[in-house]
Amino acid sequence: MIGYVTLGTNDLARAATFYDAIAAELGVSRMMEFDNFIAWGKEGGAAGIGLTRPFDGNPATVGNGVMVALEARDAEQVQRLHAIALANGGTCEGPPGPRGEGFYAGYFRDPDGNKLNAFIMG
């Protein structure tokens, strides 16, 4: 149902380093790139994530209550994604672990403060 998600950044180069590392672990790469915008995902495929400097020229800000969830293959990949995020300028919002029956996730923020998680269900 979701085609893609776009997040704002105030430092595209710094944020690109973060998302390049996350994308590599998920087995995807940059699929579109312009001066102010980069998108990662599979060509012509599933939902992706984009990163942009705001079109209106104002600073990018974090949406309170907004989070992007990245589906992982298994618990080990959740742990790797969380570690990759922290190693590339992200901050921990909750270490990987069970979050109720059948749900395992690790929460983190990107260098701009956007909240993400890596998860598995089942």
Image (cartoon, rainbow, N blue to C red):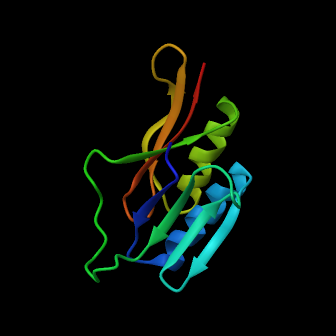
Q: Residue at x 71, y 61 (%)?
A: 43
Quarter occupied by the C terminus? top right
Q: Residue furthest bottom?
A: 35
Residue 73 position, x and y percent, is 70, 35
Q: Residue at x 43, y 78 (%)?
A: 11
Foreground residue, 84 or 33? 33
Q: Quadrant of residue 39?
A: bottom right
When the figure is inspected, residue 30 is found, relative to residue 81, above or below; the finding is below
When the figure is inspected, residue 76 is found, relative to residue 27, above or below; the finding is above
When the figure is inspected, residue 110 is found, relative to residue 98, above or below; the finding is below
Residue 103 position, x and y percent, is 52, 22
Q: Residue furthest top?
A: 101
- What number of labels is visible? 0
Residue 103 located left or right of residue 56: right
Residue 81 located left or right of residue 49: right
Foreground residue, 43 or 58? 43
Q: Residue at x 41, y 62 (%)?
A: 7
Q: Quadrant of residue 111?
A: bottom left
Residue 87 position, x and y percent, is 58, 57
Residue 105 position, x and y percent, is 52, 32
Q: Residue at x 52, y 52 (%)?
A: 3
